[in-house]
Amino acid sequence: MRAANYTFFSFILMLISVLAYSGNDKNQVGARSQALAFTGLASNNIEALFNNAAGLALLKGFSGQVSAENHFLLSDINSFGLGLGLPVKKTGSFGLGVTYYGNPAYNETRAVLAYGRRLFKNFSIGVQLQGYAVNMGEYGSTFKPNFGLGILYKASSKMWLAGHLHNPLEQSITGAQVDNLPTILQVGMLFNATDALSFFAEIEKNLVEKPIFKVAVEYAIAKKFFVRGGISGYPAQASLGAGVQVGNHIFIDFGSAWHQTLGYSPAFTLRFQK
């Protein structure tokens, strides 16, 4: 009976993981990205480590973040992320990160080594080398390597354009076709309307799913206090969040996303960046 319960619980966790991938994927990490409906493709801070490594090229100094998310208000399904970034003069910026999703019955760990470099004044490229380890408890584990490629272009003083190809080596993480690591193509835009108001838009295309359209907005209601919100489709999702800057280099972000099938997922991130 215990083995049957364990198998059933592992299956439920894997099913939730697949459903989560079918919407806003788990590749983007951080409460700010979540509150912005995962439109973080044009990020040029430490969040770029997991979103689009081309943004790492714009880091001004050592940066780091720690994140936590509770998925769908289920106490046994949580994820955590840790990321570090460091620019090296005349070389580019390097990033190292790790994420964990699940619990002892079923969990996924992802390690990321990223590099971003500015090729021209307004154009940067980035690459992510990634390893996915899936542990199914007494039923074994597996490991799959993959990578991502990204670009970031400053089209004007107010607009950034970005593109990213994630997981071009479409592989199954457990041997079943249903849980392939999806190959995802993304294009996005960030428009800074004013110093206080920014708009985000993104299109995400999983090769075997319909395109997902996302829009979001961030507004600084005070010099160091931000509110955020966004929506995306297929399946319908909405998100809200807030952030506060403490001193010159510390940022605290809160967010929550709502999935039309699975419910709410609150998140928290602590960032340090120069």
Image (tube, rainbow, N blue to C red):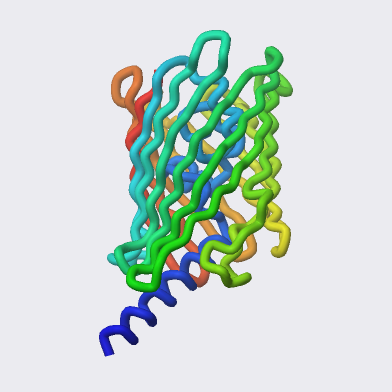
Expressed as whole percent of the image width and height from the top left, the position of residue 54 reads 61, 29
The image shows residue 128 at horizontal and vertical percentages of 57, 37
Q: Residue at x 32, y 63 (%)?
A: 103
Say how many tags the image has. Answer: 0
Q: Residue 259, relative to residue 120: is it above or below?
A: below
Which residue is rendered at x = 35% and y = 26% of the image? Answer: 272
Q: Identify the residue at the far top of this view.
A: 90
Identify which residue is drawn at 64% across, 64% down.
Answer: 234
* Residue 57: quarter of image: top right
Look at the image and tell me whether residue 246 can be seen. yes
Q: Nearer the viewer, residue 255 or 178?
A: 178
Q: Nearer the viewer, residue 141 or 254?
A: 141
Picture quarter with the C terminus = top left
Q: Is residue 85 above or below residue 41?
A: above
Q: Where's residue 73, x and y in %?
A: 34, 65
Q: Residue furthest bottom?
A: 1
Asked if residue 236 shows in the view, the reply is no
Q: Quadrant of the N terminus?
A: bottom left
Q: Nearer the viewer, residue 23 or 233?
A: 23
Q: Which residue is depicted at the point 45% across and 48% down?
A: 110
Q: Position of residue 18 (x, y in %)?
A: 53, 67
110 relative position to 57: left or right: left
